[in-house]
Each structure stands twice: as C-alpha cells, then as structure tokens.
Amino acid sequence: MAKTQADKPDPIEKKIGRWEGQFQGYREPVTAKTIHDWLAQFGSRKEIGEKVLDAVDYYGIAAIEAAFRSTVQKIEGWNTDEKQRTGRWVFAPLQGAAGKSGAAMLSYLRSALRMSGKKYQKDFLYLSDLTSAGLGPEDTLVLVDDFAGTGDQASETWELLDEILPTEPRVVVVVVVSTRRAVSRLQKETPMTVKAHKRLDGRHNVFDEKCKFLTEPEREELLALCKRANKRTPRGYGDCGLTLVFCHKTPNNSIPVLHATTANWKGLFPRIAEH
Amino acid sequence: MAQRKKQRKVARQNPEAVQPIGVKSLRTSALKPNKHNPRRLFDKEDLRTLQDSIQRVGILVPLVVYREKSTGSYVILDGQRRWMCAQALDLKEVPVNEVPEPTLVQNIVTMFQIHKLREDWELMPTALKLELLMKELQERGEKQLASLTGLDVAVVTRCKKLLSYRKRYQDMMLRSKREDRVRADFFIELYPVRNDRFVNSLDWYNKDEFTDAMLAKHLDGEGLKSVTDFRKVKQHITNARKAGRSAERAISRRLREFTEETELAPDHLRISTAEAATSARNMAKTAEKLELQLRDVDVPTVVGETQFWKSLSALHKTISRLLKKADVRA
C-alpha cells in the first residue's frame, strides 16, 4: 500500500530523532521534548537553532577515549610497552578542583590507554605527589583535560608546577580539543607542549566571518539571542563562540544559547545538573 | 689561595653549599635563566641603575653558572639581573664562575629562598618541598629543617601538619584558581580536632569522613563561620572529657550529630554542665593563686590602700554568700 502524506515523517521530527541519538549520554538527558522546547525559544527563527544544533561538535565517552588514545600515541617517546618508553611517564589532572573535568578525563585516559588496572596506579599521580615523584629532564609529565579554550587554566597550573617541581621534566598537556589561541599562548608563556586531538580556529567561532554555517544577518540574530541567554559573555567565555559539547559538561567557551540556564533562557546542555 | 682554603672549609662544614669550579668568560647568548628565578621579581628601576653601572665599569662580580648535564646549557644560579643588563647592552661575553650542577637538595633549598619572596602561593607548595627535603636528608627535626630552609620552626610545624593529610586533601590546597582553593588554614585549624585522642577513640569516628563533613560545612558557610571555629569545637570536647563519663557520652552523641548535619554550628557541642565544671576549675586555680598572694601581704605596708581593702571586702562578701548558698563550710 502506498504511503500517504500523513505517514511521511515530518523533516523536523527526523532531525530531532537524529539529534536525540547524537547527543545521547549528556549529563542532563536530551530528549525530543527538550529539543522542541529549546527550539521554541528561537520563535520564528527556529532554523537558526537547527543550524546551531547541526554545528554542535559533541563528544561522548567513546569519542573522548578515542581522541586521547590517538593523541597520546603521537607524542614522541610514548610506547604502550613501558620498557620501550623514553624515560618515565606519569599522568596527572590539569585541574584539581572538585567538579572540574581533569580528574574525570584522567579516568577516561586510563581506560583509553588500557591502564585502568591497579598495577598502573603508580603512573597516575595527584598534583601533590609531583614534588617527590623524582621526575628528571628525561621524564614526561602528562597533564590531562578535556579542553583548552583561552589557556587560562593551563597557564595557572603551570605557575603551580613551577612552584612545586624541583626538577624540569618535559610537561605535555593532552586535551581532546583546543583552540589555536590557547596552544600558541601556552607555547609562548610556558615551556609546556600542548597536544590536542582537534584544534579549533576562526572557522569554529560562530561569530567569526570565517565560520560559514550562518549568514551575517543570522549571526546578528543569534548574537541577540545569546545576549538574552547571558548578558555578560554572549559570545562564550573568552569570546570563543564555540559549539563544542562534552557529554560530562559543556565548556563555558561555547555560546550561551547551548548551555545557559537563566530566567530568560534554558540551554539544551546545562552546565549545572538539575537532578 | 686563602680564598680556596676558605671554600674548602665551607665545603667541609656545609656539604649542601655550591662549590666553584673556576672563573671564565662565556658568550652572553650561551646562558639561560634559572627557572626558579622568575623575571617578575626584578624591579625595573633597580635594573636601570645596574645597567648604567655596568655600562660604565663592566661586570665586576662574575655570574654564578652551572652546566646542565641533560642539555649541556649553562644555567644562571646567581646574577640573572647582570645577565639581563648584559643582553640589553649587547655585551658579547660575561665573566662567570662555574660551579657543579646543584643536587636535588640544593635545588629545593634555592626554591625555599625564592619562595620567601613570593606571597601569592600558600603553604602547601612549601610543605611539599619540605616533604622532599625530609625524604632526601632523612631529617624530621623541626629545628634542623627550619635552620636548613630559613623557615620559622612554627612554619615547619604547620607544614608537617598539612603533610599528615591524604593527597586528595593536599590537592585541594593546590587548586590553581584562588576561588577553588581550600586554604591551608582550614586544615591546620582542623588538625587538633581531627587528631584528638578522645575523638579518635569514639567507635563511630572516621578521620576522613569527619574531614569531608567539616569541608562541607566550611564550603557551605553554614555550620562553620570561620576556620577558628575549630578552636571552639576543641574546647567543647576538652570540657566534656574533663567532666566525666556522662559528659563524654553526651559529647560523642553531639559530635556525631555535628558531623552528620551540615547546618549545625559548634554551639551544638556546648554541654552546660561540662562548661560549668571547666569554669569552676579555672576559678579554683585563680583563687589558689590569689590566696597565695594574699598570704604574703604585709598589712602595714598596704594599710593606706583604700581600693585594695574595698576590693578584698567585696570579695569576702561574695565568697561568704556563695559558701552559704552552697552550704559549704570553709
């Protein structure tokens, strides 16, 4: 029997189904209803919201682990066989604060490198272990995090390391995603090397003319909505203008329409857990 | 010759001191700054004065450098300001006194000296360096460590208290963002309660669970208004412990409630009978002291001190009234 017009799926419902599957695993469930509610906030300009969702670069746990695996494998001197590595390799979170991403990332990295077993515990250190760890210039300290946007966090961590490390091991910051700006800043201001699975530039900033998925008038309209979502940083922290989302948390460098939870806006990917 | 003898003597007396290899000239560009000597510590005005002086008479005191084994580069141990001026003046060479590469212990001692000039870091980084020094030198004596590092003995004691905490707590003091960091003062003030012998003997007590609960109170800002509130907690515990079994049972129950309920403040630990007993003990000590002093009073010499006799008379009346009320015969 031939399909009637009514049987054909609505194109927007099809898209919503796709996004629902793509954003599965976010800390606050993304459902057809939350997507509908979110798009409704765009009023008559829902297509801008749709374009934003199409541009979201989403990393679930599997993608994060894959990114860590391929990034670490490319670092000079690394080998899965401990005996084949150049010097000693130890890993620590880039950010120590509770609720920050460094500690969670360290756990994903362990899983990615198949180093979750107890025997590898010695290779994963607290920041307070580093002073007495006896790392020399031939050794490598890998600091792990999900994202480097402005480089502020890594730069502050370097100040701490400079204070507590009695020797000078090679320090490599491994992140899933980084902006080019953060990489060049850290390489200029610190002796750390930044290794990122993906590097973002102007093309990934929705407010940059190099970013092509929105037209200029659409950009203006999006900026107005972003101002409604967050007056202080409508372009995201550090004016990064990103559409990056990690399953555990959306970076504040991403545009606020994606994550802000205020009286005027309800982001699809809230940074603060509601449940 | 006399200088060398002196240096050998210093070497014998202080094996941690850096010993010279010899004076020579090196290309200015061949030197690199010491990572423990951050540029921000240099005053621009002082640098200008030094630069003027070097331009006039050259570098009179050689820089102290060592050759880094791992890279082969010369690292400045002392004289970074002179080197910066030499660079600014485009001097091709600078006089240097080469010394052997410092040992780990020498590096840590240098870090201590640099650290003294910085104020933006808290005590935990110092504690970690002290920990390494204790490990390397097998030295735990507070006086010895203080003398070696130039720290006050009290600072060494505070550092050792911080080192008694698990690494996860130590990391809280190392958070790079000031607003995320838990201040060392919190852990230092908590220490006497956390390690109180009586508290540790309580069957429900767990050091880390108690620490986590106190952190929650501190961070919520409800149960604890200030880190010095732990002094009140300690006082309530001491009062109860000295007041006997019944007060001990009461303080155990209340301390448990205080631990489990974030919003409860130290006043919850106040046990009036225990507090009264402490107050009575303190007054008894004061009374004993006064009584001893009064025994020695030479009446003729103070007979004209009207205020003294008035105060004694008031004290006498109060004591008599209290004794009568308590039906205690003197």
Image (spheres, coloured by chain):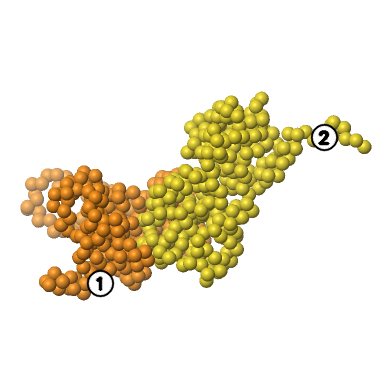
Chain colours: A yellow, B orange
- Callout 1–callout 2 Cβ contact below 8 Å: no
Residue ID at (70%, 42%) = A20
For disc 1, the chain is B
**Gap between marks 1 and 2 measured at Cα:** 86 Å
Foreground tag (1 vs 2): 2
Identify which residue, A18 or A127, lies in the foreground: A18
For disc 2, the chain is A
| B23 relative to B228 in the view: left or right | left
Q: Secondary structure at mark 2?
A: loop
The single residue placed furthest to the right in the displayed view is A1
Residue ID at (40%, 51%) = A190
Q: Quadrant of residue B132?
A: bottom left
The disc labelled 2 sits on which kind of residue? Answer: Lys
Residue ID at (37%, 55%) = A162
Relative image position of residue A202 (x, y in whole percent): 53, 39
The disc labelled 1 sits on which kind of residue? Answer: Pro
Residue that badge 2 annotates:
A8
Label 2 neighbour load within 10 Å: few <14, some 14-19, many 20+:
few
Relative image position of residue A72 (x, y in whole percent): 54, 58
The single residue placed furthest to the front in the displayed view is B92
- Asked whether residue B312 appears in the rendered view, the answer is no
The C terminus of chain A - image quarter: top right
Identify which residue, B141 or A225, lies in the foreground: A225
Residue that badge 1 annotates:
B15
Q: Is residue B47 above or below residue B33?
A: above
Q: Secondary structure at mark 1?
A: loop
Label 1 neighbour load within 10 Å: few <14, some 14-19, many 20+:
few
Relative image position of residue A7 (x, y in whole percent): 84, 34
Q: Is residue A197 above or below residue A141?
A: above
